[in-house]
Image: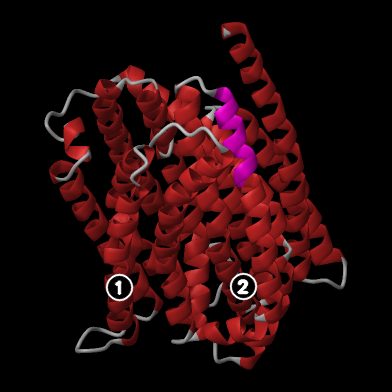
Amino acid sequence: MEQTFTIKEKMKQLGIIFVPILVTQLAMFAMSFFDILMTGNYKSDHLAGVAVGSSYWIPISTGISGILLSITPIVAQLIGAQKKKDVSSSVLQGIYVAITLAILIMVIGALTLPTILNRMNLEENVRHVAQYYLISISIGTIPLFIYTVLRSFIDALGKTRTSMFITLLSLPINVILNYLLIYGKLGFPELGGIGSGIASAITYWLILVIAIYIIHKKRPFIHFGIFNSFPRASIKKWKEIILLGLPIGLSIFIETSIFSSVTLFMSKFGTTVIAAHQAALNFTSFIYMIPLSISMALTILVGFEVGAKRYKDAKSYSYIGVGSGITISLVTGILLIILRPQISHMYSNDLAVIELTMKFLLFGAFFQLSDAILAPIQGTLRGYKDVNVTFIMAIISFWIIGLPIGYILANNTSMGPYGFWLGLIIGLAIGAITLAFRLLIVQKRFSLQESEQS
């Protein structure tokens, strides 16, 4: 990364960082996207099973990965402050934390999963698919978490094209494995939704192997000597990673688990509603990769500028990022409304599922504007290493406001399952507004520091 001086240079720098991140996020999400899409075209009950399984896997995996994303601002600020010698130890300690967290999650899952699923009001085959989908995909937990650390290191250096390259290499393999294992082609067993979990786990291992090779053999990563030595675990470094990462991870967990909780609440409305809800949620989450990628780019750029004590530049990046997110989101929201029929037909051949999916997508279109404001602000605050208020506001806006309103609307009005979506839209809007005020406060504090230094 380089220092920028004009708005035009900053927009160019943001684009250089953002575009590869977006391609990477879309490719990573495409694994889940194709899991849902290809399973939906197999059988509706398998789609429902994968939906229930995903409702547990996604918030847990993204939440824990969120803790490990603390490596990005840590490394970005070290690079900005010209402390490159400290980068290797931070990355390796992050890997140690990743392995520890992965093992912990697998043990807890093994002890609690059967009980949780047995208490849900699910058809027997849906429960079976959900359980073995989760068991299958958990095989990829360790490589997924380690790769999150390595990707955070790569991205913090501004080499987001490398992450893009790694992910794009693995995506076709994931789709091919899905095809073979879901439908039982070329002599492979026909496993349905369970096969998609196995395919994803294999893909996570592949991504890790590729990332290790590139970091160990290619420039500029080789100059950091990440794998040249393996120091002992450092309690001090673990504390830094976890204290910074825990609010990030919990914020992501809260945001993703709210959607998963809605999926579980919707089990009372039947398999068809669950399938349609999951299809609509899957596609709107796919679009969410745009503001999320802007958010991740802002964490890198703002962290780099803050580390170099160029606070005015950090502020400029935040405004450019939020403005870009809103503009893009308006376009995607309009397209989503127009193309609802075509999108719905992608996910199922069942006419009842298609009709319900179209209605859910109409609500999903209104997610876009709040997401476009909320995500970039979160990324900017992480660049400043300001993460605790984001976590608190996530709890308030989603769990204290959004979900209760959704539950009331779904169970006490004629809106039915759509009430949950309206409640989430309200929660997103409140979160966006409150974090906008928080960002202004943080930027004012750093501006005062800059004035005192000059």
> In the image, 32: left or right of 355?
left
Label disc, if present, on residue 172 of the rendered structure: 1
> In the image, 430: left or right of 445?
right
- Disc 1, SS: helix
What is the x, y in percent for residue 20? 40, 55
Residue 387, visible in the rendered structure? no
Sequence-earlier tag: 1 or 2: 1
Q: Which residue is mark 2?
A: 280
Q: Is residue 190 above or below residue 282?
A: below
Relative to the observer, which residue lies in front, 159 or 430? 159
What is the x, y in percent for residue 358? 69, 80
Q: Amino acid at mark 1?
A: Pro
Q: Name the main secondary structure of what is drawn in magenta.
A: helix
Q: CA distance from mark 1 to mark 2?
A: 23 Å
Classed neighbour count for the residue bearing mark 1: other residues with Cα under 10 Å, few (<14), some (14–19), many (≥20) = some
Q: Is residue 221 above or below residue 351?
A: above
Q: Is residue 237 above or below residue 34?
A: above
What is the x, y in percent for residue 9? 50, 41
Q: Is residue 45 above or below residue 424?
A: below
Q: Quadrant of the C terminus?
A: top right
Classed neighbour count for the residue bearing mark 2: other residues with Cα under 10 Å, few (<14), some (14–19), many (≥20) = many
Q: Amino acid at mark 2?
A: Ala
Label disc, if present, on residue 5 of the rendered structure: none
Q: Residue furthest right?
A: 413
The residue stretch that appears in magenta: 311-321
